[in-house]
Image (cartoon, helix red, strand yellow):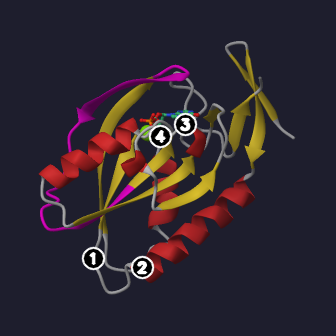
Amino acid sequence: MRTITEKGLVFDEKITPEQIASYVQAVADRINADYAGREPLCVVVLTGAFMYAADLFRRLQMHTDVTYIRLKSYEGLNSTGRVECVVPLQKPVLGRDVIVIEDIVDSGATIHEFKRMLAEEGARSVAVTSFLYKPTKLLFEDARPDYPALEIGDEFVVGYGLDYQGYLRNLDAVYTLRK
Ligand code: IMP
Ligand code: MG
């Protein structure tokens, strides 16, 4: 098992690159089946989801386009509960079937707020795929992902796009903070 140390914290490898690839393919299979013949607009929630989005998007087989938004709710190891829009939506969602691509759903505050924005802007439908999902931490029922790639426990993870204070996003696997 691989281990990484950053700023005095130790992280252990939890999900290997091979496992990631098979979880991503499983989500793509479900979305391809559910959206066959439709033209969804994928919206990537930056920054953390960019790696998952790149892997998932290239496996989608319908006509589709991708855009992004940047929302922020985490500082360090904890969710602040406030959701800020740092970079606004880059394409109109009016009348579109939107697929939100997120890195991780924790309290669900980010997705709860973003779904409210998308409804306000007239999206026809909204589905959420999240690479990781922490069911025991969910506080907003409407933020439960429709297509979670993988459920994890109450733990802090990094790698595959996910950061600790702006570091470790570039790891090719998911690592979990040693307790
Ligand atoms: P939520 O709004 O509480 O659901 O938090 C969602 C956001 O917090 C995610 O999009 C991540 O950017 C960040 N986040 C939540 N849990 C973790 C984690 O374990 N590691 C790194 N970032 C996390
Ligand atoms: Mg995020």
Mark 3 and mark 1: span between their CA atoms? Answer: 33 Å
Of mark 1 and mark 2, the one earlier in the sequence is: 2
Q: Position of residue 11 (x, y in %)?
A: 74, 29
Which secondary structure, mark 1? Answer: loop
Element on which disc 2 rests: helix
The mark lying in front, picked from 4 and 3, is 3
Q: Which residue is mark 1?
A: 39
User: SS of the residue at dot 3?
Assistant: helix
Q: Earlier in the sequence, mark 3 or mark 1?
A: 1
Residue pointed to by mark 4: 48
Residue at numbered disc 2: 34
Magenta-drawn segment: 75-100
Depth check, front residue: 144 or 10 = 144
Is tag 4's residue or tag 3's residue first in the polypeptide sequence? 4
Q: Of label 1 and label 4, which has the lower sequence position? A: 1
| Nearest to viewer (mark 1 / mark 2) | 2
Q: Secondary structure at mark 4?
A: loop
- Dots 1, 2 in contact, CB < 8 A: no
Q: Which mark is residue 81?
A: none
